[in-house]
Amino acid sequence: MRIPLLATTLAAVATFAQAQSPDPNFARNIAAACANCHGTNGVSKGGMPSLAGQSKADLLRKMQDYKAGRTPGTIMPQLAKGYSDQEIDAMSGWFSTQKP
């Protein structure tokens, strides 16, 4: 009786661990929503600033400033409030590695 219980417990732990493992495309997938205004991979075709190649620290600060209401804007404050700090950190890092 103990072996099936142990097997079930180990299977549940393995499933939980797999569900908790980071998605290698997490940042890219979240950053894709920015393409509407800031261009594919953060390379703007004009009008909006490009995000590609900016430093992670600058992008992170700008997004946190929008999120906290320290920087006014038309749509960015509302959009920034929809992201967790983890998502903002991931996006900032991803955009910083893109070629302008």
Image (cartoon, helix red, strand yellow):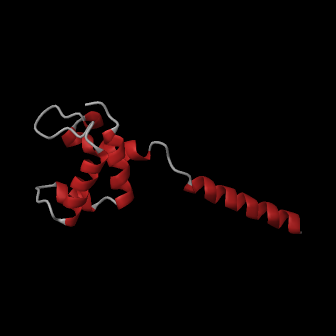
Against 30, residue 66 (above or below) is: below
- Lateral position of residue 48 relative to residue 61, left or right: left
- Lateral position of residue 74 relative to residue 52, left or right: left
Residue at (37, 54) in percent of width and height: 87
Residue at (10, 38) in percent of width and height: 47
Name the residue furthest bottom: 1
Counting from the top left corner in percent of width and height, residue 99 is at 30, 30
Could you tell me how many numbered marks the image carries?
0
Counting from the top left corner in percent of width and height, residue 29 is at 38, 44
Against 34, residue 69 (above or below) is: below
Residue at (75, 64) in percent of width and height: 9
- Lateral position of residue 55 relative to residue 90, left or right: left
Residue at (36, 42) in percent of width and height: 94
Counting from the top left corner in percent of width and height, residue 79 is at 23, 56
**Quarter of the image with the C terminus in it:** top left
Name the residue furthest right: 1
User: Considering depth in this image, is 71 or 28 the residue closer to the camera?
Assistant: 71
